[in-house]
Image (tube, rainbow, N blue to C red):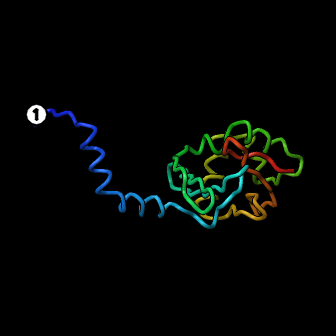
Amino acid sequence: MHQLSIDERAIENYLASSGSLIQNQIESYYNPDFLVEVGTFLYSFLFSKSEVIIITIDNQRIVNFQCETYQNLITDVFLEELLNLDCLPARIKRYSKLSCDRLRREIADELRLGAIKVENNNPIWGDYHLKFKISSSLNFRINL
């Protein structure tokens, strides 16, 4: 097939005709089970196998949609802080001998499975009584 360029007007018309489909798709990413208020916005986090979909909500209106990696959500700094906690359960502490990547995958799996829930605006890993917070950069932090 001959390589064609696409005019901006064609893209705008396509988007206009697909608007309701796109709107429905964005709405489907809203996760009422993992809502966190940070600053003046409410954030909905949806945990898929390979990425985190974050919906920004302002006054009951979705104002932004972004995809993040688990590495951006669960940073090395956060994992190091977590592994340095005195109250850390043995099962989690063993990751200090393994790797941060393995611990990140464990936390990501727990997020996908719903084992880490939001209570009083803070993510809680109930099995281990660990309380986190979401920073203004939209990544995990320790909440002591």
Residue closest to the eye, 63 or 124: 63
- The one nearer the camera, 6 or 98, is 6
Q: Residue at x 81, y 61 (%)?
A: 129
- 124 left or right, relative to 3: right
Left/right of residue 60 with respect to residue 120 in the rendered view: left
Q: Residue furthest bottom?
A: 32
Q: Which residue is mark 1?
A: 2
Q: How many marks?
A: 1
Q: Position of residue 56 (x, y in %)?
A: 59, 53
Reply above or below: 96 against 31. above
Query: x and y percent of residue 130 in the render?
Result: 80, 56
- Extreme residue in the right direction: 86
Report the amino acid beneath label 1: His
Q: Which one is nearer the viewer's eye here, 115 or 140? A: 140
Q: Residue at x 67, y 46 (%)?
A: 103
Indicate the quadrant containing the N terminus: top left, top right, bottom left or bottom right. Answer: top left
Residue 118 placed where, x, y %? 72, 62
Q: Residues within 10 Å of mark 1 (few under 14, many from 20)?
A: few
Q: Is 95 located above or below residue 130 in the figure? A: above
Q: Secondary structure at mark 1?
A: loop
Q: Nearer the viewer, residue 45 or 70?
A: 45
- Residue 96, relative to residue 132: is it above or below? above
Going 88% across and 52% down the picture, which residue do you hit?
A: 87
Corner quadrant of residue 121: bottom right
Tell whether 112 sits left or right of 97.
left
Residue 27 coordinates in the image, percent (x, y): 48, 62
